[in-house]
Image (tube, helix red, strand yellow):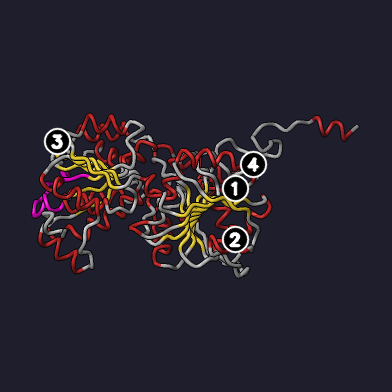
Amino acid sequence: MSFQNLGVNAALVRTLTQNGITAPFPIQSASLPDAISGRDILGRGQTGSGKTLAFGLALLTRLADRKALANKPLALILSPTRELAMQITDVIGDLAPVVGLNAQVVAGGLSYHKQQQALRRGVAIVVATPGRLMDLMERKDVILSDVEITVLDEADQMADMGFLPSVREILNKTKADGQRMLFSATLDRDVDSLVKKYLKDPATHSVQNETASVTKMSHHVLVHEANHKDEITSQIAARDGRTIFFVRTKRGADKLTEKLLRAGVKVGALHGGKTQAVRTRTLEHFKNGKTLALVATDVAARGIHVDDVSLVVHVDAPADHKDYLHRAGRTARAGEKGTVVSLVTMSQRGELKRITEKAGIRPTTTSVLPGDSELIKITGSRQPSGVPIVTTVTKSDSVQPNFPRRNRPSKARRTSNARSESRGENTRSESPRSSSSRSTTPRSEGGRSNSGPRKYGTDRGAAGKPKSRTGERRRAR
């Protein structure tokens, strides 16, 4: 079966052929004829199955040579994260001009002004995250009344991240008789209710769900002594081949990255505490091979779509079986082989066993020591160089809040604060400078600060409360 036989626009077929894409993936073969005919689509396929081209080629074929009015797109693709939105835009944006269309990413962490300008000029296809799209809708910078085709990609992840109320509000603004395509690995967590309300007699195409996908991978549980974990992790990171290390928090990602850099391993960190520019650069370095190791949190990992990741390592145990499956889905993409490894101590085995059983997999359990033959056999680990790698970190590498002007201290207050600081006085009001310095401190994925004790006056403790004098009185006696 060829793309032309599936009904894809001839100009798109020629461009795909020029780029070496001649045979459609199963999800594309199954869904394209129905999608191009205008039917609603419910697609279920694992990560790396070719979903982006499945809905992208249908959308581009149906809208070929159409023009959008200012602020009124013709098609909308919703994504749970900006990384995924940007990757979808890379795929769709390269093909859109072939059929006289254009595309624009609309996501947080990117310039409002550039997005507003593009929308005013007229954009046929908007690829958006729900939060930023809602902001622009409120500002009347984007109006969805002309949207004929709406795509929800990774709908289950949008549900996990709490976006469904916004998704419903967005869908209510699009054409009621428009085409809707929803792609999701699972239909629980209210995704099923979304399907029932907004999809009309959808054509359902399921090509290997997430559980089926991970059963084709090699899964291992490596049991180790707690004091060996850092050494084992650094040896795995020094292997040949792309490796992703998953941790639970932003602080954990930064700490592990620092340890690996000190061990002489080139590594990047991907989490919500990084600016979009840094996250994009880090992911690009991972894709082009400048770094072969990547440390990521679950939230940031939604946008990691790199086909040749050969090993995934659970440094911290996943929260549940869905997170296990999503992490594992970063490897063995597009028919390639992959290995998934979980690092646990003896006391952590029970928790991980419950997660893997619910995920429907049976990993091989092996006790390992740093540098032993079993560790090398399973992961390809080797001794890192031990020569620390120095990286340059600037304030702009961390996300800083952008407060409205009305919340800034007045000029008189800022001058007063500066004078007080120069005299060493303790004022209740913070200067903009001290506020800015704290804003760059990494936070955990849950949003709780890990910045440690704050600086208060000499009569204050770490929590900002008066110090107890009891100890001083005892010492005086």
Which label's residue is closer to the chain start, 1 or 3?
3
Q: Amino acid at mark 4?
A: Ser
Q: Which residue is mark 3?
A: 175
Q: Which residue is mark 4?
A: 347
For mark 4, does the 10 Å Cα neighbourhood hold few (<14), some (14 to 19), or many (20 or more) residues?
few
Give residue 261's position: percent from left, percent from top. Answer: 57, 62
Q: CA distance from mark 2 to mark 3?
A: 58 Å
Give residue 105's position: percent from left, percent from top. Answer: 27, 51
Q: Secondary structure at mark 3?
A: loop
Q: Amino acid at mark 1?
A: Val
Q: Residue at x 61, y 67 (%)?
A: 383
Which label's residue is closer to the chain start, 2 or 4?
4
Q: Secondary structure at mark 4?
A: helix
Look at the image and tell me whether residue 450 can be seen. yes
Q: Amino acid at mark 2?
A: Glu
Highlighted range, magenta: 60-76
Which label's residue is closer to the chain start, 2 or 3?
3
Give the quadrant of residue 289.
Answer: bottom left
Q: Which residue is mark 2?
A: 374
Q: Secondary structure at mark 2?
A: helix
